[in-house]
Every structure is written in C-alpha cells, then in structure tokens.
Amino acid sequence: MNKKLTKTAAFTMSICMMVSAVPTTMVALAADTYPGDNAVKEYREYYTASNGTNVYVDCVRDNNSQIWLTDKNIRVIQDAGTSRGMIRFPADKNPLKKDTSTWDTKAQILHNTEKVYNLYKNTLGHKNYDFSGSGDQKFYVFEFEDIGNAGSNIKIDNYGKCPDEYINLLYFGKAGQDTYSMGTDIDVVGHEFTHLIVNQKLGWWPGEISNETFSLMEAYCDIMGELCEDEPDWMVAADVFKDNTASNKIYSLRNMKDPQYTNNKLLENVTPIGEDYEFEDFSFYKNYDDYKRNTKWLEENYKYGSTMNPNYYATTIIDHAAYLMYQGGISKGDLAQIWYKSMDYYTGDTKNATFIDCRKAVVKAAESYFRNSPKKVEIVNKAFDDVKVKTHNTKLSQATAAVTTNMHDFCRIESYKLPNNTYWNTGNPSTSSRTAIANDMSSYLPMGPTALKNFVNSYWQVQEPYYQCAGFAKKLQCDYFGTNAFVQISDNSYIPEIGDHLRVERFYKGRSLGEHSVFIRTVNSNSITFADCNSDGNNIIKWNNTVNTYRDSAGRLCYKIGSYTYQFVWAERPIKLGDTNADGILSNDDLKAMDNIINGNISYRMYDGLLREYTADINGDHTIDSTDKTILSQLINNKNSARNIYGFVVY
C-alpha cells in the first residue's frame, strides 16, 4: 500500500481542539481482545445519559456473555491518551467492554453516531461512507486525552512513521470542568460527521480552504448537526455545558438564533496574546453586510490563533439563515433534505465558494424539492434576504422593466386582483372592495429607504406609511420591480419613465388643491398613461388614465384633466445599479462618481452604510473596482447583456 499523510481536521467548533472527523490510522494499544464479528450476536443494553435518563444502545454480546460497544457499522474504542499526553492508536480497533468505567459516556457517543449515520444513510440517501479511500465503510469512534497535542500527533504515530492503514474515524474530547464529553451532544457528532460529507462532496477541508468557503464549511456542519437533534435548540453544543438545563440554555459554542449573544464559557478566561481585547470584541455576525464591513478590522485585530480565526465569526450568518427557514415554517426533515441536496448544486471552483454561491445552491435545491410548494421557496429566499446574503439584481432586469408590453401584462394581472372602479380600502393592500369609505386610510404600504436629491447631500424620507394614492402607487412599484429601495427626483428636468411614482400638485383656477400620486404605465412622446387611486377622495382605483403632457415656463412637466391642472412635484423610481450619484438616471456623471469612489476621493458610505455602496458595487462582491466601472459603462450604453443581468437595488 502506498504511504501518504492523511488529512486532519482541527476542532472547528471551539478554541480548543476537542472534536474532529478524521480519516487516519491506528497503532497498538489494547486490553481484552474483542473476539471478532463471527463470535458475537446483536444485543441491546441501556446506558445512563448525561441528563440522567436511561437509554438503550445497539451493541453485541460474545459467547462468554461479555457485552461490547459496537454495532454493524460503528465501534467505540478504548481511550487514546498516554501518560505523556501523546496520542496512540489501538491497532486491533477493539470495541469498548461493558465493565469499563466510561461505558455510559461511550455508549451515548455510539448512540449519537448511530443516529447521525442513519439520518444520512436512510433519510438523506447518502451512499458512500468510505471517506478515506481505504474501502472501509465502517466508523471508529473514540475520545482522546490531550486535546492540545491532538492535531500534531493525529497525522503520524509517535515514532514519526507514516501510517499504513486508513479508517473512518471520529474522535471527541473528554469531559472537562464545565462540559460533558463532547460526543454526548448529538449536534456535535452531526457537526463532525458532516465534515466528512462536505469534504467528500465539495472538497471542503480545514487547511485547504479559507475566507467565506471556510465559514460555509462550518455552517453546513452546524446546520446538519442541529437537524440531527430531536428538537433543534439552534445552539451549537449547548447540551455539553453542565450549567445549561433543558429549560435554560445560556452557553453554546455558537448561538444560531441570536449570533451576537453567543456565550461560550470555554472562552471566559481566554485573553489574546499581548493585547487588551476581550472576546466580546469579536461578536458573531447576524448579517453579511456587517461582517463584510468589518472583515479588515477582524483580520488586523484578531489575536486568538488558528483555532478561532475570523472566518468563524461569519459562520453564524448562514447558521441564522437556516434558523429563519425553520422559524418560517420549513420542517426539520425538509431542511435536512434541501441543505444536504444543495451540495450537488454548487458549480465551478467549490473550494472558493461564496455565500452567494450558497444561496444559489440552497434555493435551487429548494425549488427542486418543493416543486409544488412555491411558498416554501419564498421562505428560503426571505431567510437569505434577512441575513443580507443576496445579489443586488432584482428578479426583473432593467431591460425587461423598460418594455411596454411587460408593463401591460403586469397591469392586466394586477387589475384582476384590484379591479377598475373598486375601492382600495380593505386594510389589505392586495384586495379592494366595491364599497366606498370616505377618507379611509386603512390600506397602506410601508416605505423602504428613499434617498432624496442625491447621495452626496442626502436625507431620508420620514413619512410612513404611504397610504391612499401614494400607497397605491408605491405598491405597484414594489410589485413590478421587486425592490423597495427608491430615489426621489425633484429636478424640473425630470423625464417620465415606465414604473415611476409621479407626484403632482393639482390646481383649479390657480388655487392649489393638494398633491396626488400616480403610477406611470406607458410613456409616449407627448403623453403618459397611468393608474391611480383616490383621485375622487374615496380611494377608487382607475387603471386607464391617458393625458397629454407639456412643460410650463419653469420647465416642469404638466398635464390637464378637465378644468384641473397637474404640475410635477417629484417622482420616485427604483434605485438602479450604477446610479452612483442617485439622480435617477445612468449617465457619464455616474462614471465620474465611480472614479472618485475607486480612487478614494469620496466615501461610498451612506447614512445607513448600505445604499450608496449598493449602487456602486454592481457585481455584488463588496469591492468597488474597475470591474464595476466596466459594467456601468455597458449599462449607460444600454447594453442588454448587462441590463438583463444587473437590475435594480435590492435593499
């Protein structure tokens, strides 16, 4: 057999190397000799779990009535520690005998490993369990004594020899002052088991990947580990902390429900080398934008060493997305299916996969699995939206939005739900009634972020919610474009576009009667067609209003209906990718602003730190550079190849 050094995973869930999934080898250490598979028969024996309950585990009994901790696929073996704290491996892979003092702990580890194995094999349909290439489909599980030296010694035996034998091995750290044995928590076992799965399917292994891919690897292991639990608590390794109770779980390695409140008791007494930073300075992240904006700071200030590198802090972003899917109504079993199946939907260089790649893969898996349940696919998409893992382009491209027939089809479908001459007053923005209620405001639409004037000197729209005419126009905008981020244009040079929310002031014989909003359906050379609501003061819906437009002496857009004159006040439209000066159009002025951003002459940080960056970071990689400028040039020149890919800003 060819000799080669096997891979080793450091413990990827805590500052200490306490758990690993390893294809590796064993050398001699044995007590009583296991009689062999031919001399044993199946048997069930109870053990006392760490929570004090008695649970049964599959094991075997030999002809001498000795009970051994093994089943057909998994064996728990003797401890691997020595007096020197160096790791030694038993060559004969002896299972543990019933009369040993650690029977209960080892039995619980075996029980957990069985459950994880059966989930992958019987529920998810995973077929290949030979992760090391040795041809061995069985597992060997043990605890080790010296967690500090595990990584350096697992690769070779203590005599520096390259191992000749390869097996599938899971090993777990023993109980400590504050924790039970790590293998007694099934989500820890599921986490480490999943390391072998993601390595086999995607090539994800510690030491061979970095950055977001490393975070993805950890997140998949966290998520699948949680889904191995009977009732997920969404707190990684919570059940190994002795101070936790079933009803009050404070400590965990990562809090998937509320990442920023992660409380890892194992790190309470850890201080970075030579610095005054506390662990709390390094909070786990709940959304992608916050993490990306702090990546440089993390890299510069991180002092904990390779067992807790900055990539861990982004793991909880994906963790939290899975938790939100569960909270949104997707069952534990269905979540396990789509996250497992998503591994088959990654494309390209998987060892450099990004969070966006993860979203695409999980959504594709969900679309395939939930073919007849589109609402569940919406839950998946919303979860990624909520943790800010999303591409900037909307479902509707800029090129598609500008086509009149597309707007016509949209209005036809919307008018089925909100018929002409009915009243938008039910309290549900998607329904109407045939009864007028004077001055009713119950149907409304909350506003998204709306930038006024431009991004250099900007302030935010504070009126909320939009209701009556403005609410109706905003609803149609959001439904059509698939975004809720808008820019408000008040310059008199305004030129109407399809999908604009146009705000006008109404005059009668020179006297102002207040303002009104309309939604522009079509634009011709001297006319516009719009839909509106509440032009009569009773929230009546009208879909087909066509008016001729003209310019007054100040250059403002105007139109007339009967004896009433309507004069431009402002217009809102979706913020377009590349609209770096936020004037509502794409032009060479945006190229100048892009140059200033790239050269560092102006900051692209807005009041909320997001919106301006989104317009300049066109390809969504959180870096503004020449690639974004090239795409912007294509958008300005109406290149449909770009306009079909890069839509409006999604906030």
Image (cartoon, helix red, strand yellow):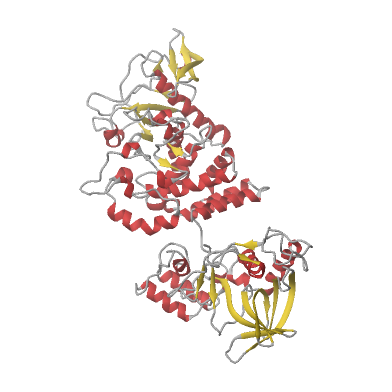
Of 56 and 651, nearer the camera is 651
Vertical relation: 493 (above or below) 300: below
Of 322 and 428, nearer the camera is 428
In the drawing, does residue 551 fall left or right of residue 631? right
**Residue 133: x %, y % from top left:** 43, 36
Vertical relation: 217 (above or below) 577: above
Residue 535, picture quadrant: bottom right
**Residue 592: x %, y % from top left:** 42, 79
In the drawing, does residue 514 fall left or right of residue 236? right
Residue 335, picture quadrant: top right
Vertical relation: 54 (above or below) 440: above
Of 439 and 227, nearer the camera is 439
**Residue 554: x %, y % from top left:** 57, 90
Residue at image position (40%, 22%) is 105
Residue at image position (44%, 36%) is 131
Vertical relation: 621 (above or below) 500: above
Residue 308, picture quadrant: top left
Residue at image position (55%, 77%) is 638
Quadrant (top left/top right/bottom left/bottom right) for the N terminus: top left
**Residue 394: x %, y % from top left:** 57, 63
Is residue 9 visible to the viewer in this orientation of the structure? no
Total numbered labels placed on residues in the image: 0
Of 499 and 243, nearer the camera is 243
In the drawing, does residue 558 fall left or right of residue 384? right
> Residue placed farthest to the bottom in the image?
553
Residue at image position (46%, 31%) is 186
Is residue 223 visible to the viewer in this orientation of the structure? yes
> Residue placed farthest to the top in the image?
64
